[in-house]
Image: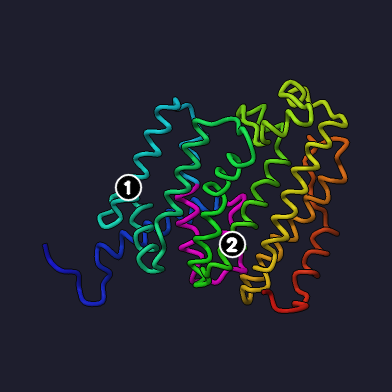
Amino acid sequence: MSAAPSGAPTADAVALEAAYRECEALARSHYENFPVASRLLPARLRRPIAVIYTFARRADDFADEGELTPAERLAALDAFGQALERLDAPREPLFVALADVVRTHQLPLQPFHDLLHAFRMDVTVTRYADLGELMHYCRHSANPVGRLLLHLFDAATPRNLGYSDAVCTALQLINFIQDVGQDLEERDRIYIPQDEMRRFGVDEAQLRARRNDFALRGLMDLQIKRARALLQAGAPLGRVLPGRVGFELRMIILGGERVLKALFERRDDVFARPRLGARDWASMLWRAALPPRGRAG
């Protein structure tokens, strides 16, 4: 087999470029809650983030989409985990690109394994006995993404990782609060601790009937309060990260605050999903652009 002409891309380079393009195409078409399309992101990181998103998206599809049996879903996730362990000799395009991202940016593999653990829980767990179980799920489903992004930004200090975990868990809890009715109806999942439901006298039948009352409002107030405290605990990260990355994170945090405010104001119907309007976005842009009042500790 003859060598590539001088200056011509090698077969490996062509395969790597094709792998990146495939990940970018998927990311552009499915970027609901992942900032792959943001022009605020540094250009050099858009491709790595698209690859990370593609890994998470495909694994999530194994857990939730299609007509696979639970055993088939778990087998597909196990195969993903095995491919993750073979990044020194990747076979399919996603892992060709992922191997390059991990090597170039010195990313830890544990966050990827944590994501797979969460997706396995999506297949096998539909109720959470207490807050500890729910936080265990969030540590694996939400926090790994933030940790990987901090590694890409060369900002993965212990302090920043703690801030990031708080923000990511808060955003996950906000999604749970918004989608309490939809998660139960469509996937038979409840992301409210069972012991807290019992404490407030709320049962599954009430959630399925979408029946609002004083007890349910009290239960959801607790969930909102918890998410707000976590969001505030992690908010300093938006002032620690520089430039466009910090601005984008401040927008995300302000968006979470706005959604929590809307959820609290609509407690008479906890099943109504709030939507942010033009005034909300204008206020968030203004606040995100304000200079910091002091250095984050």
The relative height of residue 268 versus residue 241 in the rendered view (above or below) is above
Q: Quadrant of the C terminus?
A: bottom right
Do tag 2 and tag 1 residues touch (Cβ < 8 Å)? no
Residue 162, labelled with which disc? Answer: 2
Residue 29 position in % (x across, y down): 55, 50
Magenta span: helix, strand or loop, mainly?
A: helix
Residue 83, labelled with which disc? Answer: 1
The three-letter amino acid code for the residue at tag 2 is: Gly
Please report the bounds of the magenta region as a residue range.
31-56
- Position of residue 41 in the picture relative to residue 224 (left or right): left
Q: Secondary structure at mark 2?
A: helix
* Rendering quarter of residue 182: top right
The relative height of residue 268 versus residue 140 in the rendered view (above or below) is above
Which residue is rendered at x = 72% and y = 41% of the image?
A: 177
Which residue is rendered at x = 64% and y = 68% of the image?
A: 237
Query: Which mark is first along the chain, 1 or 2?
Result: 1
Residue 63 position in % (x across, y down): 49, 36
- Mark 2 or 1: in front is 2
* Rendering quarter of residue 191: top right
